[in-house]
Amino acid sequence: MNLSLELMLQLAIIMPFLSTIGMVTVGRFPNARESVTITTCLLLIYLVVQLYLGLSAGESIAAFWWELLPGLSISFAIEPLGMLFALIASFLWLVTTCYAIGYMRGHNEKNQTRFYVCFAIAIGAVMGLAFSANLFTLFIFYEVLTLSTYPLVTHAGSEKAKKGGRTYLGILLFTSIVFFLLAIVSTWFVAGTLDFKPGGIFAKDVDKIVAGILLVLFIFGIGKAAIMPFHRWLPAAMVAPTPVSSLLHAVAVVKAGVFTVLKVCVFIFGIDLLAVLPTTQFLVYLAGASVLLASIVAMRQDNLKARLAYSTVSQLGYVTIGALLASSAGVIGSSMHIAMHAFGKITLFFCAGAILVTLHKSKISEMRGIGLQMPLTMGAFFIASLSIIGVPPTGGTWSKWYLMIATLETEQFVLMVTLVLSSLLNIAYLLPISFHAFFPNLSRFTSANDATCQTQNAQVSLPSFAIKEAPLPSLIAIIVTTLGCLTLFVYPQPLFELASAVLTGRE
Amino acid sequence: MTAHLPILQVIIPLMAAPICLILKRAKLVWLFSLIVSVLAFSVSVLLLQQVMTSGVISYELGGWQAPWGIEYRIDKLNAFVLLIITSISTLVLIAAQASIEKEIPKDKHTLFYVLFLLSLTGMLGIVATGDAFNVFVFLEISSLSAYALIALGKNRRALWASYQYLIMGTIGATFILIGIGLMYQMTGTLNMQDLSQRLPEVAATRTVFVAFAFVTVGLCLKLALFPLHLWLPNAYAFAPSIVTAFFAATATKVAIYLLIRFTFSVFGLSFSFTTIPLQTVFMALGLIGIFVASSTAIYQNNIKHVFAYSSISQIGYMIIGFSLSSVTGLTSTLLHLFNHALMKSAIFLALAAIMFRVGNVQLDNFRGLGRQMPLTMAAIVVGGLSLIGVPLTVGFVSKWYLLTALLEQGWWPIAALVLLASILAVVYVWRIVEVAYFKEPLPDRAPVKEAPLIFLVPIWILVIANVYFGIDTRFSVQVAESAAQSLFGVSL
């Protein structure tokens, strides 16, 4: 049993990479190519679920691949946090692939084979990252993820895509090479190991200043966590096709960032050490500022995807705050928020893409009344917005709850206020979208001038309202993730167990 | 037979060069040179094996005993460098046949191979010999043939570049000769091992100081350390592409080898690094060189210029590792010697393939190449990633060692700067990637096909080596580390 689980772990990482060979071979036949992708998704989910069952049964699952440099190996081990991340990523990959098939064909995108291949590589990298047993392995897959998503961001090949790609790659490589790598080498030098260990790897008597500087390097270096001022890559990445934005830039890549932050905080520093470092407080406030500022910027965006991107920047700040609060409630809240936000945000992006494909609209100001044309999509948008805001009956409630408890426990009242304020801002920039979609004549939120103009528009287009939903595969994807948001509210138990096992070790 | 390996290493290509003149027919000469290079490669593999298992090999030329006769002395360090040179020369020669077809006039093809083999002989001789004057002789053989090789370039500016190199190279060689002469004056010997024993007695004299200064500056000219790098960009850019691929991977490496040999083995560690502030000077020059050359690379439109400047900046990395005068530092330099040879030969061979198909390597002509020559461009991308130091490529391995070496001595600001400089590499590599993959081809450039197999095979062998040695580091790290250790242990 043990052996086969080990094998499954390695397969879960290798399989997405291997599937690219199949995709390239049958690349000329879209249906065959998509079946390769779907089959891989299903197999991956099967493997990850088996691993989850193994982990729940108390098995310890690890694999060793290769010693790259003396003492630095590529090896993997499963622990609850990585398990949680892998479960979300593999499940949402399947959903996104369904969505992407509808979207990419509906949009007549070019180079679809390249798209699916890079997507699979990115997921393989996420699996490797989630299961990595040391910081070195994690770093390798972190970089693979950056590079494999670059062709996805620049998929359109236009001047704008090129520019976005430049910002994307520039910031992510800059932070990872200059700060992250330096932090890793220094950690290796100070601690003598890079293995993830519960409670951290630094000696008890480590110099607090040095460790504090390292923490700053880590938090800045993990650019994928999009802490301001290194967040610009995320809005820039929005030039990508919507499936990419939804899975990679709402789930896989950004979650890889905050996942890494959590891993570093819990397994490299250990929350006991974290609590006494001189720089922690500064970084917590920085993350808090990032939460608020990004929310404010989000309010000013008229492009729906840009607004969602800034909202993501803000939500990622929550996870970082939770990790840096160095309390068990914080870690639980952060871990749960990775899942909750994933479901909420992916739904929002799916909806944005559906609106683009069906109605060819990307600006929020043009979206009045579309709820009458796309009732299901906009209904889903509304529920997902609730989850992001963190109110029942959606999953987002729970993670916010634990994060609030963590701020209370650690007596960080400024942060508590920040979280509350941010929730209010969330309401302000998300809910009007669905309100206006369903009630086009409701003009309280806009200026008088604008409103008359809008109302006229709406009146002109009112007679032509006919239900025109997104392509069926995309619609199914939207419904699945929306149900996910709701289910996680009613039934958060497995998630909570995984999250609370992060600190205690295996379940 | 195996006892004569050290001299065979040098004599095989030397004897082969005139034979080329007899063979005459270009294709035959190509095949012959290739065989010679493969032979030289096998010899160097055997030598390395022998050195790793049974230690230093000393070979007395003509049976004359060491301090009087010429001694060839192979230890881990030069066996490693010999292997780098011969492996690259073999891979480069495979593609040479097709490449010179387009770039060198027909009647000069035989001459090209003769010069190539002579240049190879010179480099191998410099590395293999244990005699200081012999070093100079081989240095001249390799340099003179190099000037001629560069002058073969189709572009008329090749002549000017070659002339510049001739002047600078001759100054460098003369400086080295003066240095060797001064050492001879003080000790009465030319044998390196003998020198290393006799020099400490007279170390405090001004003459030895001057000798050291001449040798070091001469070598820095040869290895193109900033600010003595001015000859390099044009020489690389206007030489025939094959020549560039060969030199970029080997010529400066040989000079760095000599620098290590003279400072560590001949003058000795304590003299080079304590009596003379070599560390400060080299670290500063290395760092400035990295930044200046990388930033210059960003603004070049001739892609050969881009990678020529990149070579200068990479030399900076090697010099920084060297300046630390620690085992880890030297290991990082030696590793980068090997790794950089792999990256640059892959990239320049790919450029040779583009030269073959497109006719020049101006940035504008790269438009659309991502689609038209996918395999060649992919090779440049992998080579570029390796230059940047992305994990799982060789560049990462050398960077990792350089960083640990820097942190070991508490030079963390330098470590941060070194990492910052690799971002500049991202910029100049990505400029090419964007043009090749995102821009439509120029209307006046006829569409081109993928490069022929004769290019693709050596290019992709090198690309795979870039990744393979980035993952399986046992060979390179072990050799580099033990070579560095032996240099620090007993000098010679």
Image: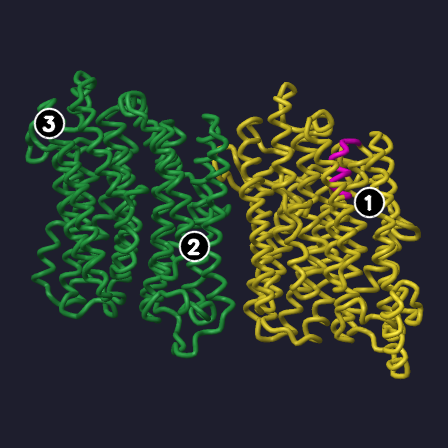
Q: Among the chains, which one is green?
A: B
Element under disc 2? helix
Label 3 sits on residue? B184
The C terminus of chain B: image quadrant? top left
Give the residue type that dot 2 points to. Answer: Ile
- Identify the residue at horizontal 19%, vertical 60% (top origin): B159
- Discs 1 and 3 share one subunit: no
Q: Which tag is nearer the camera, tag 1 or tag 3? A: 3
User: Main SS of the magenta segment?
Assistant: helix
Residue B468 in the image: state x and y as whole percent. 43, 48
Q: Which residue is mark 2?
A: B298
Q: Residue furthest top?
A: B201
Q: Position of residue A101 (x, y in %)?
A: 70, 70
Q: In front: B179, or A192? A: B179
Chain coloured yellow in the rendered structure: A
The residue indicated by pointer 1 is: A495
Q: Nearer the viewer, mark 3 or mark 2?
A: 2
Q: Is residue B61 above or below residue A318?
A: above
Label 1 Cα neighbours within 10 Å, binned few <14 / some 14-19 / many ≥20: some
> Label 1, label 2: how many angstroms apart (C-alpha)?
49 Å
Label 3, residues with CA under 10 Å away: few <14, some 14-19, many ≥20: some
1 and 2 marks in contact (CB < 8 Å) = no
User: Tag 2 or tag 3, which sits nearer the N-term?
Assistant: 3
Q: Is residue A322 magenta?
A: yes
B410 left or right of B55 in image:
right
At x 63% / y 18%, what residue is drawn?
A205
Q: Quadrant of the N terminus of chain B?
A: top left
> Over which residues does the magenta segment extend?
A318-327
The numbered dot on residue A355 is none
